[in-house]
Image: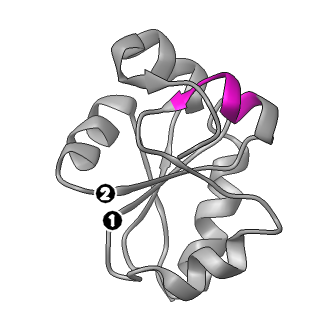
Amino acid sequence: MSEFKRIPPEQALALRAQGAVVVDIRDPQAFAAGHITGAKHLDNHSVADFIRNADLDAPTLVVCYHGNSSQSAAAYLAGQGFSDVYSVDGGFELWRSTYPAETAQGDTE
């Protein structure tokens, strides 16, 4: 079974630039208010479809509010067969303060 890795926003930015999938597990209102540009919102209702349609070998970055819940979600994805999963330390809050230009609003992504 694969394990996830914890990474800082700087490493997450580099992986995203190389095409990593970014998933945000915060609540829909928080996601709509702001998220990492290009992130997909995942919740209990959408995770099964995401897993079914995902490339299990693609780098996958998991983001929450502060980097705690994303660890559980990353471990879950690793347990579902994802081979390259990362939990972003500091979550969206640290990302937003580090890379304010790399955030988007709305719930369309």
Q: Position of residue 79 (x, y in %)?
A: 60, 83
Q: Position of residue 42 (x, y in %)?
A: 67, 58
Q: Position of residue 17 (x, y in %)?
A: 20, 44
Q: Quadrant of residue 63?
A: top right
Residue drawn at x 25%, y 49% is 15
Badge 1 amino acid? Pro
Q: Is residue 78 left or right of residue 8?
A: right
Does residue 85 sit above or below 55 in this rendering? above
Identify the magenta region: 30-35
> Dot 1 corresponds to which residue?
59
Residue 90 visible, this angle: no
> Are the residues at dot 2 and dot 1 in contact (C-beta closer than 8 Å)?
yes
Looking at the rendered structure, the secondary structure element under dot 1 is loop
Q: Nearer the viewer, residue 91 or 103?
A: 103
Does residue 49 sit above or below 4 in this rendering? below
Badge 2 amino acid? Ala
Q: Is residue 10 left or right of residue 89?
A: left
- Specify the principal SS of the magenta part: helix
Residue drawn at x 45%, y 23% is 103
Q: Nearer the viewer, residue 47 or 85?
A: 47
Residue drawn at x 39%, y 79% is 83
Q: Is tag 2's residue or tag 1's residue first in the polypeptide sequence? A: 2
Residue 58 visible, this angle: yes
Q: Is residue 49 left or right of residue 82?
A: right
> Dot 2 corresponds to which residue?
20
Q: Nearer the viewer, residue 31 or 9?
A: 31
Does residue 12 sit above or below 58 in this rendering? above
Looking at the rendered structure, the secondary structure element under dot 2 is loop
Q: Is residue 88 magenta?
A: no
Q: Quadrant of residue 60?
A: bottom left
